[in-house]
Image (tube, rainbow, N blue to C red):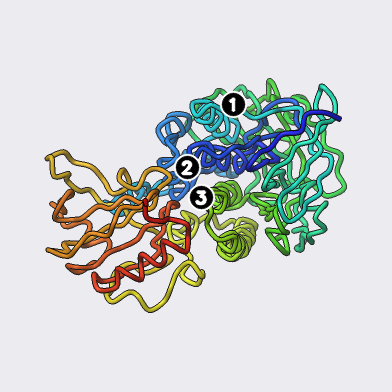
Amino acid sequence: MARNEDLDVLVCGSGAAGLTLAIDLARRNIAFRLIDKAPHPFAGSRGKGIQPRTEEVFEDLGVIDRIVASGGEYPPLRTYTPDGPVDRHAGIPPEPTPAEPYQIPLLVPQFLTERRLRERLAELGHAPEYGCELVGFEQDPDGVTARIATPGGERSVRAAYLVGADGGSSFVRKALGIEFRGKSLGVRALVADVRADGASSRVWHRWGDEQPERSVSLCPLHGTDLFQYMAPVPLDMDVDLSAEGLTALLHERGGQDVVIREVSWASVFTMQARLADAYRRGRVLLAGDAAHCHPPTGGQGLNTSIQDAYNLGWKLAAVLDGAPESLLATYEEERRPVAEAVLGLSEKLLEAARNREMRRGREVTQLDVGYPDSSLSPAGLEPGEGVASGDRAPDAPVTGAGGLPTRLFSLFQGPHWTLLGYEPGAAAVPDPRRGLRVHVVGDDILDTGGHVRSAYGLAPGQWALIRPDGYVAAVAGTAELGTIETYLDGVGVRPVR
C-alpha cells in the first residue's frame, strides 16, 4: 500500500450525482477526487428524462445549452392497435414564463448527459478516475481513511469527507450498515439501446398496449441513431439480449415490421422502491441512488439524484471553509423527505401505467420542490405575501443600470449567496461579505417589466436572501436586516475584515 493523500472530499461513483457534486466542488476550489470502479463511463440510456428543475440546475452549472443540444423533446406516442396505429401527442406544451424559463422535460440518453457533465468537469480541471474501487474505509472525528484498489495496486487516501454516490448496490451504504428499506415492486423489465430497421425515429412506438405486461416499446434517442427498447418480462423468464432475441420478443408482441439490427447496451432489472434510513454517518454521506431507488416511471430518479448533489455541494464547501458542522445535518433533513415523496409519486405513476394511463402533470417537473420545514428556513421573518423561506427562487428578466437586459438567474449563477433588495430607498445596504452578492432593484438593476415584483411579491424595503442552490433562505424588511446578517454568520458567510 502506498501514496497517502490529503483531500477535502473523496467522491465514490461517477454517475450523474457524482459528476454534479464534482462540478460543484470544483467551482468552489475544493480539493477532491472522483473515483469509479468501472473501467469506463456508463454506456446506457437508462435515465433519459431531464425535468425542468434539473434544467435550472444545469444552467447554474454552466452546461444547459450542451444538454439541450444533445437531446430534444419527447416525441409523440404511436400505439399499435388491432385497428391500426394511433398517434397521441402530449398536447400543447406550456410556454416558458418569466419566473419559470424551463417548462418542457427533455429526452437525453443518460450516457450523453454524463458525457456533457464530464466535459464541464474537464473545463474546471478535473476528470473521473476509472478502474479505482473503494474497498474499505475507516473514519475518526477528523476525517476518513479510504483504501482504493487501482490498476497500480492498493492505495490509501485521507479525506475530510467521503460521499457514496455509488448506486443502488452502494458499497459505502452497506459498509456503514445503513438499512435500505423498501420493497420490490414485482415488475421485471429489460431495457436496451438498439439500432433498428423499420421504425421511424419521429415517434415513440408501443405495441401490446391491450396487455401492458406483454407490451414493448421503442423510444428514439435524440442525438443518436439509437432507440431505447423497453419491455416488461416475467420474473422467471430467461431473457435473450442479443439482436435476434430482442427481435423475436418484439415480433411476439406485435412489432413484426421491425428488426433489431444491433444492441449497444442492455440490462434486465427488477423495479425497486427503497430509501436509506440515513443519509449520513459521521463524515460519510450518501447521494443519489445510493440513498434512494425508484421505478423509472415519471423520470424522477436521475433528477432527484442530481438535486441531492446540488444540495450537498455548497454545504460541504461551507463547512470545509469554517461554517458550523451542523450545516451538514440539513442535507438529510431537506433531501430525504423529497426522495420519500418522489418514491410515492413514482409508484403512483407505475400503477397508472399498468392501467394504461400516461398523463403527467406538473408534479413531475420538480419545480415545486422546496424546503419550507428546513431548519435553514426560519419562520416568522416574512412580512409580506410573496415568496417564503424554502421556496424555489423564481427567475425574472431585469435591466442592468447600464441599460443591458439580464435575468435574475444570471445574477444568481455561481457558487455565491445573493441578497436581493427591492426598492429600499435610502436604507443602508449591508456590508460586503465574501461569498455574498447584493443586488438592489431600483439601483443596479431595474424591474422594467414588473416581473420581480410579480414573482417575488416583495414590497418596497424588503429583501430576499437566496441560497447558492437557488432557494429562498429568508425574506425580511429593512429593519430586520440584522437578522439576515446573523443568519449569514451561521452558515459561514462572514464579513471581510
Element type at mark 3: helix
Label 1 sits on a secondary structure element that is loop
Residue 246, quarter of picture: top right
Q: Quadrant of residue 115?
A: top right
Q: Residues within 10 Å of mark 1 (few under 14, many from 20)?
A: many
Q: Earlier in the sequence, mark 3 or mark 2?
A: 2
- The residue type indicated by label 2 comes to Asp
Label 1 vs 2, first from the N-terminus: 2
Residue nearer the viewer, 158 or 44: 158
Q: Residue at x 80, y 27 (%)?
A: 150
Q: Position of residue 390 (x, y in %)?
A: 43, 65
Q: Does the image show residue 169?
A: no
Pointer 2 residue: 87
Look at label 3 and name its amino acid. Trp
Q: Nearer the viewer, residue 377 or 194?
A: 377
Which secondary structure lies at badge 2?
strand
**Which one is nearer the viewer's eye here, 123 or 371?**
123
Q: Amino acid at mark 1?
A: Leu
Please name the residue that numbered disc 1 is placed on: 226
Q: Count how many numbered circles sit on residues in the image.
A: 3
Q: Position of residue 132 (x, y in %)?
A: 76, 30
Distance Cα–Cα, label 3 vs label 2: 45 Å
Give the label on residue 314, or none. Answer: 3
